[in-house]
Amino acid sequence: MNSFLDDFKLAFRTGNILNQIIIINVVIFLAFAVVNVFFTFAGEGKTFALISRYLMLPAHPDNLISQPWTIITYFFFHKGFFHILWNMLFMYWFGRIISEYLGQNKLLGLYVWGGIGGGILYILAYNLMPYFENQVASSYLLGASGGVVAIVVGAATFQPNFSVHLLLLGPVKLKYIAAFTVFVSFIQSTGTNAGGEIAHLGGALVGFLMIKQLQQGNDWSKPVVSFVLWIKSLFKPQPKIKVSYKKAKTSSSRSTGKAKAKSSAQSKTAQDEIDTILDKISEKGYDALSKEEKQKLFNASKD
């Protein structure tokens, strides 16, 4: 078990941001699916539903004020198998295009801002449109769709004529895929999944605006990346370097001191190299590493 956990941690640490987002979504989905089974067997299905609501985004302002964190947590939380399956497949397909042309950080920015934008439009629609007046108090939003659609539309905005091969259809340009996605979400925005479809539209708008701003030199992903790096720094072990001064009595003791100092400096240099490699993975992905960098990372994982 320890070996499995170590392999999982290493895979997550050395994976690119696209893989990390997918892993987080899948792990949360599986964990809650297992917990749901135990709660249901114990006759506590309603209790589990109440717990789940603390991760979902409520439409009613009073509920939102009591759980403001849900503007982030809702787009990492899924319930249905096919819900998360299609979201993660679209995330992977179109996220690779963003990663290849714009880098990992832009992908992260699109996902987070798309999710937030989708959530905001959902809240505004349910509180301002008369059609949702009787639904606002009991409506909750979940799923990564807003962030995923932001990535799809972002990719189409940046590379509109880029073609992908679709089953039964053959090569289709990104601009047509994005237009179809937005159109379907719009005509279904009064259906049974109205909240989700409206979140799609919010994510699409964010994806379009973010790429247009990026083309003008304004990178919306920077605050998101800075925040994530700050969070990571809280869990990153800091090297403990103890420096002591001792009066040298013999040439032998001086030599020993120099050797220790040299060893400490080499250790710090090695850690700096690993940090640089991890930063490169975060920006460009694991495949961008050279053979020597991959070997250094592998050696470090065994220490």
Image (tube, rainbow, N blue to C red):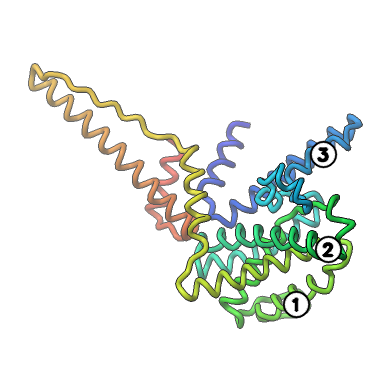
Relative to residue 255, is residue 111 drawn left or right? right
Q: Give coordinates of residue 14: x percent, y percent.
A: 51, 49
Label 1: which residue?
Answer: 180
Q: How many C-alpha atoms fall within 10 Å of the one at disc 3: few (<14), some, or many (≥20)?
A: few
Q: CA distance from mark 2 to mark 3?
A: 22 Å
The N terminus is located in which quarter? top right
What amino acid is found at the position of numbered circle 3 in the picture?
Leu
What amino acid is found at the position of numbered circle 1 in the picture?
Phe
The C terminus is located in which quarter? top left
Q: How many C-alpha atoms fall within 10 Å of the one at disc 2: few (<14), some, or many (≥20)?
A: many
State the residue lying farthest toward the top. 249
Q: Nearer the viewer, residue 80 or 234?
A: 234
On residue 194, the disc is 2
Q: Give coordinates of residue 278: x percent, y percent.
A: 44, 50
Quarter location, residue 136: bottom right
**Disc 3 + disc 1, Cβ < 8 Å:** no
Q: Nearer the viewer, residue 10 or 213?
A: 213
Q: Nearer the viewer, mark 2 or mark 1?
A: 2
Q: Nearer the viewer, mark 3 or mark 1?
A: 3
